[in-house]
C-alpha cells in the first residue's frame, strides 16, 4: 500500500482555492496544498458546453487520511459536482514520505 496520496479539485476563484488549501493544511488533513491558475476549463454541464476560469488545488496527504480529506472538501465545496481525483503516489522520496506522514 502506498502511504502518500495526491488529490486535485478546482474552484471558481483564487480566494476560495487559497482558503480551501490553507484550511485543509490547518485541519491536519493535508501536509501540503498548492494552488495553480487561473486555468480555463471547457466542459458540458446540463447538456450545454461551458467554459470558465478556475483554480486548481493539489493536495498531498497521508493515504490513511484520504477519505477524511475527501469528505471535508466535498462538505465545503461550492460546486454541485466537485472535481475530486485522488491517486496514490507511485513513489515518494524517503524524506518527503516521512515528512508527509509526520504532519498532523
Image (cartoon, rainbow, N blue to C red):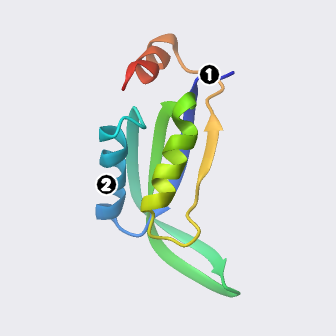
Q: Residue at x 51, y 58 (%)?
A: 74
Please provide percent x and percent y for residue 99.
40, 18
Q: Quadrant of the N terminus?
A: top right
Mark 2 against mark 1, which lies toward the viewer?
2
Question: Is the residue 94 above or below the residue 104 in the image?
Answer: above
SS label for mark 1: loop
SS label for mark 2: helix
Residue position marked by numbered label 1 in the rendering: 91
Crowding near the residue tagged with mark 2, few <14, some 14–19, many ≥20 C-alpha atoms within 10 Å: some
Q: Residue at x 38, y 50 (%)?
A: 35
Q: Quadrant of the C terminus?
A: top left
Nearer the observer, 19 or 72: 72
Crowding near the residue tagged with mark 1, few <14, some 14–19, many ≥20 C-alpha atoms within 10 Å: few
Please provide percent x and percent y for residue 75.
47, 59
Nearer the observer, 84 or 95: 84
Q: Residue at x 33, y 62 (%)?
A: 16
Residue position marked by numbered label 2 in the rendering: 18
Please provide percent x and percent y for residue 72.
46, 51
Mark earlier in primary sequence (2, 1): 2
Amino acid at each position: 500500500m502506498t502511504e502518500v496520496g495526491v488529490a486535485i479539485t478546482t474552484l471558481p476563484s483564487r480566494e476560495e482555492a487559497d482558503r480551501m488549501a490553507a484550511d485543509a493544511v490547518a485541519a491536519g488533513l493535508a501536509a501540503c496544498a498548492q494552488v495553480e491558475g487561473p486555468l480555463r476549463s471547457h466542459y458540458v454541464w446540463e447538456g450545454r458546453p461551458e467554459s470558465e476560469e478556475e483554480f486548481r488545488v493539489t493536495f498531498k496527504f497521508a493515504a490513511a487520511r484520504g477519505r477524511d480529506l475527501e469528505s471535508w472538501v466535498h462538505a465545503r465545496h461550492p460546486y454541485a459536482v466537485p472535481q475530486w481525483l485522488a491517486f496514490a503516489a507511485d513513489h515518494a522520496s524517503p524524506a518527503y514520505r516521512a515528512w508527509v506522514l509526520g504532519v498532523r
